[in-house]
Amino acid sequence: MKTETKRLLLRELEETDIDRMFLLDSNPEVMKYIGVPVLTEKSQALEVIRKIRKQYDENGTGRLAVIEKETGLLIGWSGLKFLTDEINGYKNVLELGYRYLPESWGKGYAMEAARASLDLGFIDMKADIIYACAHFANEGSNHILTKLGFEKTGEFEEPDGICNWYELKRNNYLP
């Protein structure tokens, strides 16, 4: 699984991404609305990468490393996850997700990579619908999802607060 945009390369996460993944998932600002604790050891980042790589094998999809072409650095991840655990009553569906280092925020990277991920889902994987969720207080993520064409269809409670639930149907997606 690999795709590119004008400024980004999206590729499968590799164990060699451990340092940048640790930088991402150990940052309290990045993890503020995620509902899981920040990582405290690099070995935890390796576990995350291995878990995602297992999803590639088992489900044919998973979150992808987002590499900034200009610098060659991993700036976050984006992509589709096949939900095997139930979220908001949904299971065995595709969910769009993303996470970026703060220095990458506000540059349009999340939109750019999300569009590439949605293309993979709707065009390559022939999905009819893709879901997403965002913590109600995460204005940036909620804005991105709305701008991508996702429609808020509900809310659900998480331990850290209320999350908005979104869906985007293939016939409403404008690549």
Image: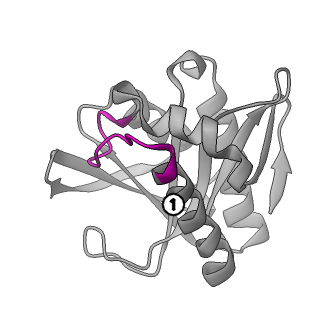
Disc 1 residue type?
A: Glu
> Does residue 9 belong to the magenta stretch?
no
The quarter of the rendered structure image containing the N terminus is bottom right
Residue that mark 1 sits on: 47
Residue 106, quarter of the rendered image: top right
| Image side of residue 172 versus residue 88, left or right | right
Would residue 35 be counted in the magenta stretch? yes
Query: Would residue 62 be visible to someone looking at this image?
Result: yes
Majority secondary structure of magenta residues: loop
Residue drawn 69% across the image and 55% down it: 15
Where residue 95 appears, x then y in whole percent? 49, 62
Asked if one can make out residue 175 in the rendered structure from this viewpoint, the answer is: no
Say which element carries label 1. helix
Q: Is residue 126 left or right of residue 72?
A: left
Q: Nearer the viewer, residue 79 or 36?
A: 36
Give the residue displayed 72% in from the left and 73% down from the top: 125
Residue 120, image x and y in percent? 74, 61
